[in-house]
Image (tube, rainbow, N blue to C red):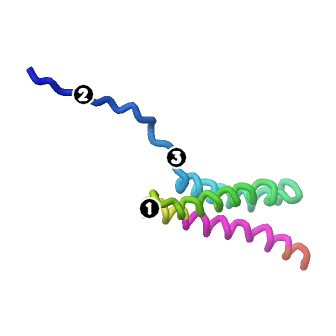
Amino acid sequence: MTTGTRHIDVSPARRLGAPQLALALAIVSVPGSLFPWDWFTGGGLVIGVPLAVAGLVLGLRARRDPAATRGGRSMGTAAAVLAVAVLLIPVLWIIASALG
């Protein structure tokens, strides 16, 4: 008869981390910034910009996290770049509508 201890893993299930959430928010902000302009005035500002800002903030936080893996930092970088591009869409849209 052996006497040993058995370990039971009671840690919570793996959740969506900051890099994955940042990338998801940045991706969702693209249609959120493009399509609502036809639905109501300033739709891209109301829907897409807040999503892009949240994606940018989480992406930058994921890049600075010392415990982040290389893949997490890459996802954070991709999310930040995409979020900045999405933040430029309403600016360009407003400039184009003012000139046209």
Task: Tell me which residue sits at (65%, 55%) in the image.
Answer: 28
Sooner in the amino-acid sequence: mark 2 or mark 3: 2
Residue 71 appears in which quarter of the rendering? bottom left
**Image coords of residue 16 (percent x, y):** 52, 46
- Residue, disc 2: 6
Sooner in the amino-acid sequence: mark 3 or mark 1: 3
Tell me the chief SS of the magenta region: helix
Q: Is residue 76 rendered to the left or right of residue 86?
A: left
**Does the segment drawn in magenta span residue 71?**
no
For label 2, count other residues whose C-alpha is less than 10 Å away and answer few (under 14), some (14-19) or many (20+): few
Going by the numbered disc 1, the residue's amino acid type is Gly
User: Quick one: which residue is furthest to the bottom in this view?
Assistant: 99
- Residue, disc 3: 16
Sooner in the amino-acid sequence: mark 2 or mark 1: 2
What label sits on residue 41 in the rendered view?
none
Task: Tell me which residue sits at (43%, 60%) in the image.
Answer: 69
In the rendered image, the quadrant that contains the C terminus is bottom right
- Residue, disc 1: 71
**Image coords of residue 55 (percent x, y):** 64, 58
Q: CA distance from mark 2 to mark 1?
A: 33 Å
Foreground disc of the pair 2, 1: 2
**Image coords of residue 17 (percent x, y):** 52, 50
The magenta stretch is 77-94
